[in-house]
Image: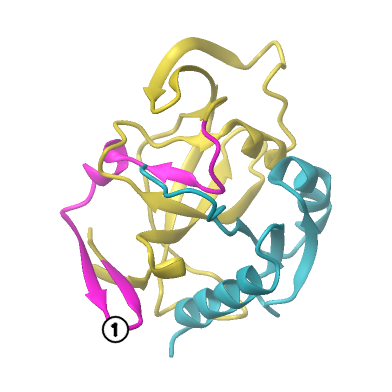
Amino acid sequence: MTYCYPGIDGKPIIIVGVQCLLSHRGFFTSMLIDTGADETCFPASFAELFGHKNDHPHVEVIPASVQGIGGFSDSYLHSVQVSLLDPVKSTTRKPVIAWSSKIKKSPFVDKLECPHGLLGMDIMNEWREVCFQPHKKGLWIKIVI
Amino acid sequence: MNYYEKLVKHIDRSMKAHPRSAMVMDMRSFDIIARGPNFKSLGEKAASAQAGVSTIVFQKRNQKAAWIL
C-alpha cells in the first residue's frame, strides 16, 4: 500500500498516532521523519501527555543512552506504539489507522528540545519505501508499506 | 482535498496564529481546545480533553536558529 502525506510547515513532518500500551491512552502528534535517527524517540516532556511521570520507579532510566548535538543524554523508556493515519480513508468522524509499528518501546529523551518526536530508522526499516517529493507548496511524503 | 490535507492546513494555520504555543486540537472540528507555553503545561489539559475525542498535539518549531536534526 502507498500513502502520500503533505509535510507540515514544508518539512518532512507527518501526523502519527501514538498509543501508550500500558494505559491505552493515545493521541496524535507530529513527528519528523529523521533518517539520521537510529531510534524513534520523543522529547521527555511528551510523557506528561500520557499522564506518565519520567521519575516514576517503574520507568526504566537509561543513562547516557542517546547522543546528538547536545552530547549524551539520559532517556526514559516508555511502552508506546506509533501508527500511520490513512490519509484517504480518515474522515472528520473517524481517523483511520493504516499501519502500526512493531516497535513497542521508545525512549523519551531529556535533551531532545524540539516540538515533535523523531521517527527514526527502526520504524522506517519496517517500510518498503519512503521518499520526499518537493512540491511548489512544500513537500510530499510517500510511504510504501 | 482529503481529510489529512485539511488537517495539515488547519495545523499550519493554527501554528501561524500562535507561533509560540503548544496546542491540542479536536480532530473532528479542528477547534483548538487547549493551549499553553509548552507540552508539559498541556499534560493535564490534554488528558482531560481526550475523553471520547480524538486530539492532536503540536507546536511550531522555534525559528530563532536553524534546525539540524
The outermost residue toward the front is B64
Q: In this view, does A15 lie to the left or right of B51?
A: left
Question: Which of A69/A1 is in front?
Answer: A69
Taking the spot 51% from the left edge, 37% from the top edge, the residue there is A42
- Determine the image quadrant of residue A97: bottom left
**Magenta segment range?**
A112-141
Q: Where is residue B65 in the image (x, y as percent from the top left)?
A: 48, 48
Color used for chain A? yellow
Q: In this view, does B58 lie to the left or right of A3?
A: right
Color used for chain B? cyan
The residue type indicated by label 1 comes to Lys
The chain that hosts pointer 1 is A
Q: Where is residue A89 in the image (x, y as percent from the top left)?
A: 43, 78
Question: Which of A79/A45 is in front?
Answer: A45
Q: In this view, does A112 lie above or below A33?
A: above
Assess whether residue A10 is covered by the magenta stretch: no
Q: Is residue A135 left or right of residue A51?
A: left
Taking the spot 31% from the left edge, 71% from the top edge, the residue there is A139
Taking the spot 56% from the left edge, 45% from the top edge, the residue there is A19
Assess whether residue A120 is covered by the magenta stretch: yes
Question: Which of A91/A9 is in front?
Answer: A9
Q: In this view, does B59 lie above or below A104?
A: below
Within 10 angstroms of label 1, few (less than 14), some, or many (20 or more) residues?
Answer: few
Say which residue label 1 marks: A136
| Quadrant occupied by the C terminus of chain A | bottom left
Element under disc 1: loop
Q: In this view, does A132 lie above or below A19?
A: below
Taking the spot 39% from the left edge, 80% from the top edge, the residue there is A88
Q: Where is residue A38 in the image (x, y as percent from the top left)?
A: 29, 31
Question: Which of A47/A144 is in front?
Answer: A47
| Quadrant occupied by the N terminus of chain A | bottom left
